[in-house]
């Protein structure tokens, strides 16, 4: 039997989880009829949810022994939740997908057909439209991919999703990259392997609201740039050179201006030079500080996630209580 692990990171998904479970069961049962040699486990990760997400995990585990879960001790972020799922999955193949049904389970049979015979190590989806997104958000998303592919040696396909069907070999390669500051889109591209991209139209959530704000996505994009590019360090050098040239021009203008308006020319010269040099220094220090901060977090060797409750501890506790 070949085991397929479906890894689902969740944060406040109580409204959509029952719908997701019904849909994934429908698709998995159909796949098992077509391929009797496969089986499934459904591995949910509770990333510090504040709603009934964990309670729903317990209810699903009670009625379906294939349901496994980890409840993280707090909100670590989607990247850490995905890592926890990949690390604890047992499958010969591993699927990463969201619970909001924007990653349609109906794609799984086709994904499996691409990967099962070893022709590809990964099948993933690529959005060809951003229906339902605001124009501003779509603009900045496309801008991010353009900038990232210009300043990084790792190519990230525009519209590529975390929705991936991977071989165990590729999953193990991803897990070998155990850095604390994670950017999975870059990691998936960096490890290489043979990838089949499947285009699809954007699907809106059937219930609930996304936890990704514009500011959250902006911070996530900075994580990606700093994880796979040193270009911002070169910006500090460029700005320093530009600042030096502008300082020379200001000095020259101040000297000429002081001939006609001595007091004003001198004051403008001093103020302009101080502000320019200060701005360049602050920018350079800020860029270096951000990279130093990332290095600081890596050197600490903190765990990427901490588990609170798991399906094993929950089932063990229920069994123990039933025996009393």
Image: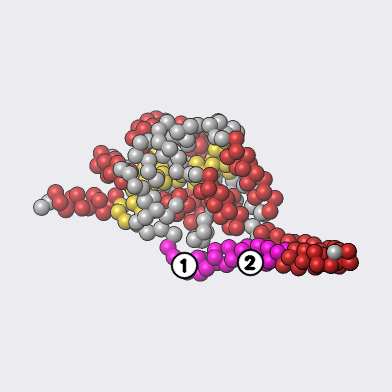
State the image coordinates of residue 310 (x, y, percent, origin top left): 30, 52
- From this view, report whether residue 109 is shown above or below residue 146: above
Q: Which numbered tag is attached to residue 260?
A: none
Q: Residues within 10 Å of mark 2 (few under 14, many from 20)?
A: few
- From this view, report whether residue 311 is shown above or below residue 109: below
Residue at 56% x, 55% y is 223
State the image coordinates of residue 39 (x, y, percent, origin top left): 37, 40
State the image coordinates of residue 200 (x, y, percent, origin top left): 56, 32
* Residue 60 horizontal side relative to residue 176, left or right: left
Q: Quadrant of residue 18?
A: top left
Q: Residues within 10 Å of mark 1 (few under 14, many from 20)?
A: few
> Could you tell me if residue 43 is visible in this image?
no
Q: Which residue is mark 2?
A: 285
* Residue 178 horizontal side relative to residue 48, left or right: right
* Residue 112 horizontal side relative to residue 42, left or right: right
Residue at 88% x, 64% y is 260
Q: Quadrant of residue 309?
A: bottom left
* Residue 184 horizontal side relative to residue 65, left or right: right
Q: CA distance from mark 1 to mark 2?
A: 25 Å
Q: Which residue is mark 1?
A: 301
Dot in front, 1 or 2: 2
**Magenta residues, start to end:** 275-303
């Amino acid at each position: 039997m070949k085991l397929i692990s479906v890894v689902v990171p969740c944060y406040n998904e109580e409204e959509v989880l029952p719908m997701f479970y019904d849909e994934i069961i429908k698709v998995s049962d159909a796949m098992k009829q077509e391929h009797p040699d496969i089986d499934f486990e459904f591995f949910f990760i509770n990333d510090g949810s504040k709603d009934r997400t964990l309670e729903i995990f317990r209810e699903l585990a009670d009625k379906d022994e294939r349901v496994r879960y980890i409840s993280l001790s707090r909100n670590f972020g989607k990247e850490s939740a995905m890592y926890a799922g990949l690390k604890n999955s047992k499958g010969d193949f591993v699927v990463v997908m969201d619970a909001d049904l924007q990653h349609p389970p109906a794609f799984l049979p086709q994904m499996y057909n691409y990967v099962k015979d070893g022709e590809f190590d990964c099948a993933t989806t690529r959005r060809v439209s951003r229906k339902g997104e605001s124009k501003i958000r779509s603009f900045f998303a496309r801008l991010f991919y353009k900038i990232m592919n210009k300043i990084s040696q790792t190519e990230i396909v525009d519209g590529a999703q975390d929705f991936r069907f991977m071989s165990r070999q590729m999953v193990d390669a991803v897990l070998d990259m155990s850095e604390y500051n994670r950017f999975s889109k870059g990691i998936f591209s960096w490890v290489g392997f043979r990838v089949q991209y499947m285009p699809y139209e954007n699907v809106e959530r059937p219930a609930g609201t996304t936890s990704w704000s514009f500011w959250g996505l902006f911070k996530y994009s900075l994580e990606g740039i700093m994880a796979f590019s040193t270009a911002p360090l070169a910006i500090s050098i460029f700005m320093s050179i530009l600042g030096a040239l502008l300082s020379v021009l200001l000095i020259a203008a101040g000297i000429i201006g002081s001939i006609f308006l001595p007091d004003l020319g001198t004051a403008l010269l001093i103020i302009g030079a101080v502000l320019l040099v200060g701005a360049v220094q602050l920018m350079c220090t800020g860029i270096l500080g951000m990279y130093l901060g990332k290095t600081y977090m890596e050197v600490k060797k903190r765990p990427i996630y901490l588990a609170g409750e798991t399906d094993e501890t929950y089932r063990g506790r229920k069994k123990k209580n039933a025996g009393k």
